[in-house]
Image (tube, grey):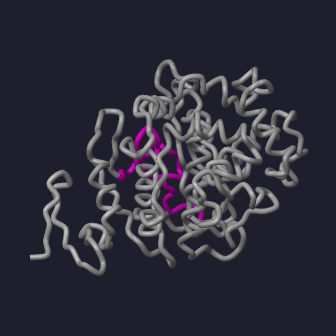
Amino acid sequence: YPWLYVSELKDWRYYSNQKGFYTPNTKQWLNKSDLIAQFTSSLYTSASYSSGNLVSNNNLSAWFDRSIEINGLMLVIAGEVGGQIAVPDEWAKKVAQTVKLLTDPNSEGIDISSQEQMIKVLKGETGTWHAGFSSVQRIAYGSGADYSPNPLTDLGRQSYLGYENFQDSNMMNDMIWYRNSSDGAPNSIGDYDIAEVLEHLMHTIHLYGVPGAVPNSSDALQWDPDFHSGWQTSELYFAVKEAVDNGVFNLADYRDENINSPETYRVVCKEYLYLLNFGMWEFGQEFWENGTLSPEWSDQARTPSGVKELNPLGFSIFNSYIKPILSKPSLSALRSIFQDNDSGISGYQAD
């Protein structure tokens, strides 16, 4: 009989010579390597790793009405408000599953103790650099302009009861947009959804979780002049400067284009770490439109070898402070979750 019982996963899987292993809860076929990845991901568990349920939450402001807590990060999901419909539950679970893929302790090369420290930093636990302030990822529908009033404007956000206080009480950065319409028509392409989700999750995790995880990373990754007095002598500063000087990173759309300006440096660091991460994982040529972000990021730096040649300080930063704690999701896993026209199933399971 073509059925196999995988004891560690505690689940039956149907096997086809042509298609591989069928996963009932996601209704997807997996090849052998993907099944092995699922098998090995169950090997290490600790109290640091938790996958919460999607729950109603009345403590998030008038804009957000649900939340999921996943491996140190709180996802908050916009409800039906401001003339816009609610973000679907399944989209929120897709984002949560992506967080799990990025924080897999059994992924190759992960230093578990440092990854667990990253989770503590994200939570804002005692002794971390933003202690008392939890890291939050906001998820909303379309764009700010699709809400009335626009909650991204100074005047508009005051209209959403509790939102300003929620912002001031937590660490948060960019939005993840479901059916992103910031540039016009709502997106319906699965690969662009992947880019949207990964970019903004990376912004949040790179800023509020990575510094302070690996030993010495707090000093090395000084990105915010408001918190970090030595930012102009940090490893991150010199890596960014090298990328700019070598034509890897073009600052034409970044404020005054001067990394010695605190406000410019803050934004540049956020984008640089994401672009560096995409280059080292070779994700840019997979998920960016037409496989490129040039001239903002050089096509020659979309691979580890290109980064090593043109931005060796960035290559060192990634291998020292990011690679030990962030796990690279497989292309097949991401593309099974995010498919064109909002297809695909999250496969997210709470503890």
> Picture quarter containing residue 215?
top right
Q: Nearer the viewer, residue 141 or 122?
A: 122
In the rendered structure, does residue 290 fall within the stretch colored magenta? Answer: no
Q: Name, please, the residue furthest toward the bottom.
A: 18
Q: Quick one: 29 or 270, which is closer to the camera?
A: 29
Q: Is residue 292 visible?
A: yes
Residue 168, above or below 62: above
Residue 337 image offset from top left, x and y in percent:
43, 66
Magenta segment boundaries in residue numbering: 54-82
Q: Nearer the viewer, residue 246 or 79?
A: 246
Vertical position of residue 119 compared to residue 141: above or below: above
Q: Residue at x 42, y 45 (%)?
A: 108
Q: Is residue 83 visible?
A: no
Tell me the quadrant of the picture where the N terminus can be found: bottom left
Which residue is rendered at x = 82% and y = 40% of the image? 264
Q: Residue at x 38, y 63 (%)?
A: 346
Q: Which residue is drawn at the image coordinates 32% and 72% (left, top)?
A: 28
| Residue 107 placement, left or right of 16 | right
Relative side of 113 to 188, left or right: left
Q: Is residue 128 above or below residue 146?
A: above
Coordinates of residue 134 in the picture (x, y in percent): 51, 34
Where residue 269 appears, as percent x and y from the top left, is: 73, 41
